[in-house]
Amino acid sequence: MWREIKTSINKAADKILGRQDKPKRNDWFDEECLLILEEKNKAYKKMIGRYTRQNELEYKRKEANHMFRNKKRALLHEKLSNTRSV
């Protein structure tokens, strides 16, 4: 009985309001970020497989974190500058 009520409510809501796609969560995450993240994941798997200082240093390189932080900041500054000029 509950399923029938739920489906009828969902159909009515879809008819009246329509469907909306979820907004993209991370606008700053692009192909470059994906490549660096894959490299970091490979280094992590290598470090877990054989724990050495060298493998740990390769995994803990700060490149990925710096890139992510800089891209987030750049997007935030861009959004703020667009809202100020409006």
Image: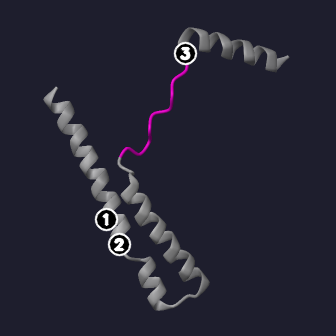
| Proximity of marks 1 and 2: CB atoms separated by less than 8 Å | yes
Instruction: Tell which circle, 2 or 3, labels the residue nearer the N-terminal end.
Output: 3
Which quadrant of the figure has residue 39?
bottom left
Label 3: few (<14), some (14–19) or many (≥20) C-alpha neighbours in 10 Å: few
Magenta portion: prevailing SS class: loop
Label 1: few (<14), some (14–19) or many (≥20) C-alpha neighbours in 10 Å: few
Question: Disc number at residue 38?
Answer: none
Which quadrant of the figure has residue 54?
bottom left
Q: Is residue 15 left or right of residue 34?
A: right
Which residue was labeled with disc 1? 66
Q: Amino acid at mark 1?
A: His
Classify mark 1: helix, strand or loop: helix
Measure how far apart labels 2 and 3 are at the Cα level. 44 Å
Q: Is residue 62 left or right of residue 77?
A: right
Question: Disc number at residue 62?
Answer: 2
Q: Find out whether residue 20 is within the magenta segment.
A: yes
Which residue was labeled with disc 3? 18
Image vertical order of residue 20 relative to residue 29, above or below: above
Label 2: few (<14), some (14–19) or many (≥20) C-alpha neighbours in 10 Å: few
Q: Which residues are magenta?
A: 18-27
